[in-house]
Image: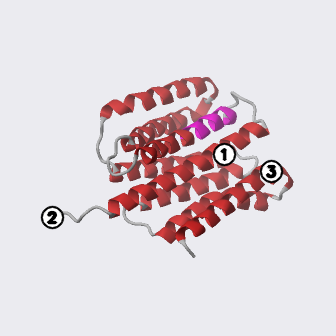
């Protein structure tokens, strides 16, 4: 089977599972809802394994695995404890995504740290009155997110990939951040958990993960095409 055909098959199956989860979540038994929720990210992991993973890509793959674990725990009912475990899993995923960007784009450019740091500081101040004993974990979460967005911005101006791929890669990190920010507003009671809002969160979440995976693939092709370094 050609790679493009296989890619469309994976994408179509992931989209079908995601749409089915959002449409039938409340009518399904818990096991069925969890299976459909995990399927899109699981298929992303399978796609990366099918394409082949090297010492740089492994951090995206491991990040997807921890994002998968986050999805699992966040779907379990009646559990502030489960929510915390889900948050912890996603923090580990963000660390791994950040390591990936450091490994593949090591230039620092400290000026790019200010916008995401300001964004996450404002978000933390918005949440702060509702955090209670979750204040320190959420602060750590916001710091990690600021670092993740900063390192993802290194893709802008990467001469190895096209402009569209540069922007799409950074867009993936911003979309992921938007998903988690809206979810945070819901979890800590600043906005009501309307089904349409939850569907938007999940759509942004899967889209962000997909864009990170897809643009990592583009970067990998460019990296493998480099001429070998002179001895």
From this view, report whether residue 109 is shown above or below residue 46. Answer: above
Residue hosting label 3: 23
Residue hosting label 2: 230
Distance CA(mark 3)–CA(mark 1): 12 Å
Q: Depth check: 41 or 144 in front?
A: 41
Residue 70 lies, in percent from the top left, at 60, 52
Question: Quarter-wise, where is residue 225 in the image?
Answer: bottom left
Residue 186 included in the magenta stretch of the image: yes
| Cβ atoms at labels 3 and 1 below 8 Å apart | no
Residue hosting label 1: 203
Of tags 2 and 1, which is closer to the observer?
2
Q: Which of marks 2 and 3 is nearer the N terminus?
A: 3
Locate residue 178 relative to residue 18 in the image: left or right. Answer: left
Is residue 154 in view?
yes
**Which part of the image, by quadrant, shows the C terminus?**
bottom left
Distance CA(mark 2)–CA(mark 3): 55 Å
Circle on res. 94:
none
Residue 158 lies, in percent from the top left, at 34, 46
């Amino acid at each position: 089977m050609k790679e493009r055909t296989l890619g469309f098959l994976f994408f179509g199956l992931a989209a079908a599972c995601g749409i089915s989860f959002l449409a039938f979540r409340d009518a399904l038994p818990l096991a069925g809802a969890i299976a459909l929720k995990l399927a899109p990210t699981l298929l992303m992991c399978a796609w990366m394994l099918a394409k082949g993973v090297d010492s740089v890509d492994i951090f995206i793959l491991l990040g997807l695995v921890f994002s998968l674990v986050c999805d699992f725990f966040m779907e379990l009912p009646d559990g502030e404890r489960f929510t915390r475990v889900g948050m912890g899993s996603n923090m580990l995923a963000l660390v791994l995504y950040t390591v990936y960007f450091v490994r593949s784009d090591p230039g620092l450019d400290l000026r790019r740290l200010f916008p995401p740091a300001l964004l996450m500081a404002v978000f933390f101040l918005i949440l702060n009155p509702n955090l209670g004993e979750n204040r320190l974990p959420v602060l750590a979460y916001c710091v990690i997110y600021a670092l993740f967005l900063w390192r993802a911005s290194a893709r802008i101006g990467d001469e190895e990939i096209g402009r569209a791929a540069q922007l799409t890669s950074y867009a993936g990190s911003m979309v992921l951040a938007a998903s988690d920010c809206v979810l945070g507003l819901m979890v800590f009671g600043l906005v009501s958990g309307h089904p349409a809002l939850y569907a938007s969160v999940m759509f942004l979440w899967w889209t962000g993960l997909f864009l990170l995976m897809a643009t990592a693939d583009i970067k990998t092709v460019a990296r493998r095409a480099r001429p070998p370094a002179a001895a």
